[in-house]
Image (spheres, helix red, strand yellow):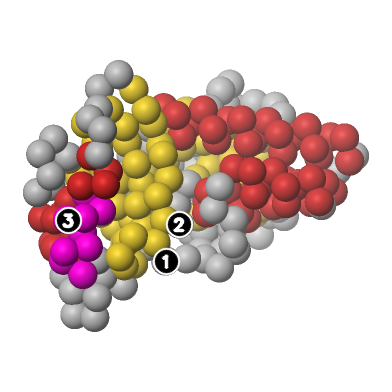
Amino acid sequence: MSYLLRLALPDRPGALGAVATALGRSGIDIASIAIVERGDTGAVDDLIVMLPPGGLADTVVTAAQSVPGVRVESLRPFLDGGSGIQDDLQLVDAMAARPEEALGLLADLVAGVFHADWSVLLEWVGPDDVRVREASGGAPSLGGDDLATPERIRATPPWMPLAGAARLERDDRWCPARWSDLGMELAAAPVGSPQLAVLVGRPGGPTFRASEVDRLGHLAGIAATVARTAGA
């Protein structure tokens, strides 16, 4: 079983190596490491870890936090969607190779960049009229029952049109009730205009950090530029 482990590490040489050693002693393998943020007080890293057969998730937390100063921000099951897209540059390369599909590729693949479960491309057509333009595999159904094409979502998000990339709070006015139970974390960014936005959902966390929101905005801007250049 694989898990996404987010760690807050102290600003101390060897802290990550000490965590790797502690995990290894518990039979836990590290499949990948990604830097999320670095600051004056330390770093935040995402690790994909693999437990041995019969291993318990609590073992990961215990091993990681056995290193002084290390804090586990979240641990959640990690399911590889199989797209092979795991970082910003891979997504940019995919859009550059197929510029006429840039917006669809953004919606389909950007979730993988942020270890999220799903993403959708939403278009604000007018008051009380927001449509699902594109959606990734596993994206939740947001549509109503009026058979509109593209699909009109049930409730207009109060944050659309969207001026800039942002972490979003769950809001009962438009979020499905189940999202609270799932601990859904949300972030969105405009794609070329406030009327078009990509929304990313990460059930169970971790919370989208400022650096991730900035990256999402940057990728959305690149997608808009590539699509515009291609005439898509």
Residue located 17% across and 39% down the image: 70
Q: Give above or below for 179 relative to 195.
A: below
Task: Give the quadrant of the C terminus.
Answer: top right
Residue located 16% across and 66% down the image: 26
Horizontal side of residue 129 vs 23, given as left or right = right
Q: Nearer the viewer, residue 102 or 211?
A: 211
Residue kind at label 2, given as amino acid type: Asp
Q: Which residue is mark 1?
A: 79
Q: Residues within 10 Å of mark 2 (few under 14, many from 20)?
A: many
Residue 5 point in image, percent of width and height: 29, 52
In front: label 2 or label 1: 1
Residue furthest to the front in view is 13
Q: Earlier in the sequence, mark 1 or mark 3?
A: 3
Is residue 19 visible in the rendered image? The answer is: yes
Distance of mark 2 from mark 1, alpha carbons? 8 Å
Q: Give above or below for 86 relative to 215.
A: below
Residue 22 — which label?
A: 3
Q: Earlier in the sequence, mark 3 or mark 2?
A: 3
The answer to whether the residue labelled 2 contacts the one labelled 1, judged by CB atoms less than 8 Å apart, is: yes
Residue furthest to the top in view is 40
| Residue interval drawn in magenta | 19-27
In front: label 1 or label 3: 3
Residue 8 point in image, percent of width and height: 25, 37
Residue located 24% across and 75% down the image: 52
Q: Which residue is mark 2?
A: 117
Distance of mark 3 from mark 2, alpha carbons? 28 Å
Residue kind at label 3, given as amino acid type: Ala
Horizontal side of residue 165 vs 181, given as left or right = right
Residue located 54% across and 53% down the image: 86
Q: Secondary structure at mark 1?
A: loop
